[in-house]
């Protein structure tokens, strides 16, 4: 069953007098117990997409489109209804940068309790609920008396994940959950995300790192300049990438067993305040043609789609 549908979502930021189209017509469906990876360069709109779903955009505005949870729009809910019924309970988010997600002046326990109070769990045994969540990320109860600065990077990240899991949400959005962690802690966090999926959670994993996405995701959306350039199953997109941007991303990712030389993608993404008409990858695409100056068509592939004139 479809857990979450994103329909033609458009999100804008206003910076000085300019409108930035950070997410420009994204549509995706997340099934129960499925994980979708969203990958792309910094500034492509992937974090904005996650923040829009959880309605925590700061300074941004959802211009149009919809997000449906169990076929019900969550964008038309009042802030109060969304806060009570959806945020943390049905959909939660592991925000980018554990240190920034934790409040340095409150103990870990106070930060867990804040969420429980907000969701009217006053009469329940808080410690029991918190223990379940800490157990699932492998943290001892002793972390509750600590302040964020007293925890290692890996422990802080686990604490942030435990908070996201506190109310047992159906969907977790993880934004760069392993950035700035050493490889051993990264591996632990990834196996934790895989475990959550096994336990029935649906995941949206946002990362610039294709390797991390490939470890956890069933499907992947390649995002470029606010749009999804290609979408499909992990295996299909990795073994047979169709969009020239996906091909370039894969060629610029080191392989553990070596292989062909790494190629860096030249140029920069377009300015989203005044994106070019037609394909946004035009200026960097080695296969660009004259007709690419028009908006590319969306072509169905084996298990997804690609937005490119090459497959018309
Ligand atoms: Fe390249 Fe044209 Fe495809 Fe864009 S539409 S990715 S410019 S071939």
Image (spheres, rainbow, N blue to C red):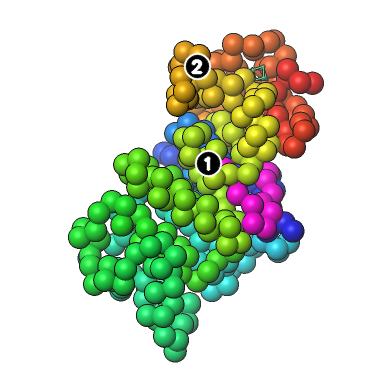
Task: Give the residues drawn in magenta, as a range.
Answer: 24-37
> Residue at the location (31% across, 72% down)?
141
The quarter of the displayed image where residue 179 is located: top left
**Location of residue 35 in the rendering, given as x and y in whole percent from the top left corner:** 60, 49
Asked if the magenta segment contains residue 106, the reply would be: no
> Residue at the location (64% across, 27% down)?
239
Residue extending farthest left: 150
Quarter of the image where the C terminus is located: top right
Which element is circle 1 on? helix
Camera-side residue of 54 and 230: 230
Disc 1 crowd, CA 10 A, few/some/many (<14, 14-19, 20+) = some
**Location of residue 136 in the rendering, given as x and y in whole percent from the top left corner:** 44, 65
- Quadrant of the picture in which ligand 1 is shown: top right
Q: Relative to 297, is 191 on the left or the right?
A: left
Q: Relative to 127, is 203 on the left or the right?
A: right
Camera-side residue of 95 and 143: 143
**Location of residue 135 in the rendering, given as x and y in whole percent from the top left corner:** 41, 68
Can residue 272 be seen in the rendering of this structure?
yes
Which element is circle 2 on? loop
Could you say which disc has been placed on residue 215 in the image?
1
> Residue at the location (44% across, 77% down)?
129
Could you say which disc has been placed on residue 47 in the image?
none
**Location of residue 177 in the rendering, given as x and y in whole percent from the top left corner:** 42, 48
Prevailing SS of the magenta stretch = strand
> Residue at the location (47% across, 50% down)?
191
Residue under label 2, please give it: 259
């Amino acid at each position: 069953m479809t857990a979450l549908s994103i329909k033609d979502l458009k999100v804008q930021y206003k910076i000085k007098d300019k409108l930035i189209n950070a997410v420009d017509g994204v549509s995706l469906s997340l099934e129960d117990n499925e994980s979708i990876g969203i990958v792309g360069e910094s500034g492509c709109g992937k974090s904005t997409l996650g923040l829009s779903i959880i309605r925590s955009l700061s300074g941004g505005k959802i211009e149009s489109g919809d997000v449906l949870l169990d076929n019900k729009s969550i964008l038309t809910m009042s802030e109060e209804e969304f806060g009570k019924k959806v945020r943390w309970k049905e959909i939660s988010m592991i925000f980018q940068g554990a240190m920034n997600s934790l409040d340095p002046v409150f103990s870990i326990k106070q930060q867990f309790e804040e969420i429980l109070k907000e969701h009217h769990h006053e009469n329940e045994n808080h410690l029991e609920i918190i223990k379940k969540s800490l157990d699932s990320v492998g943290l001892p109860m002793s972390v509750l008396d600590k302040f964020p600065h007293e925890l290692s990077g890996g422990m802080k990240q686990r604490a942030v994940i435990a908070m996201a899991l506190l109310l047992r949400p159906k969907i977790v959005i993880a934004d760069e959950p392993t950035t700035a962690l050493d490889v051993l802690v990264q591996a632990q966090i990834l196996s934790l995300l895989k475990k959550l999926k096994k336990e029935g959670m649906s995941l949206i994993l946002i990362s610039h790192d294709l390797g991390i996405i490939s470890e956890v995701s069933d499907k992947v959306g390649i995002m470029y300049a606010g749009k999804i350039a290609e979408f499909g199953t992990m295996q299909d997109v990795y073994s047979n990438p169709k969009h020239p941007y996906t091909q370039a991303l894969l060629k610029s990712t080191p392989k553990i067993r070596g292989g062909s030389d790494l190629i860096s993608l030249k140029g920069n993404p377009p300015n989203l305040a005044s994106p070019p008409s037609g394909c946004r990858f035009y200026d960097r695409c080695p296969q660009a043609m004259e007709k690419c100056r028009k908006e590319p068509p969306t072509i169905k592939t084996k298990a997804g789609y690609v937005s490119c004139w090459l497959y018309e």
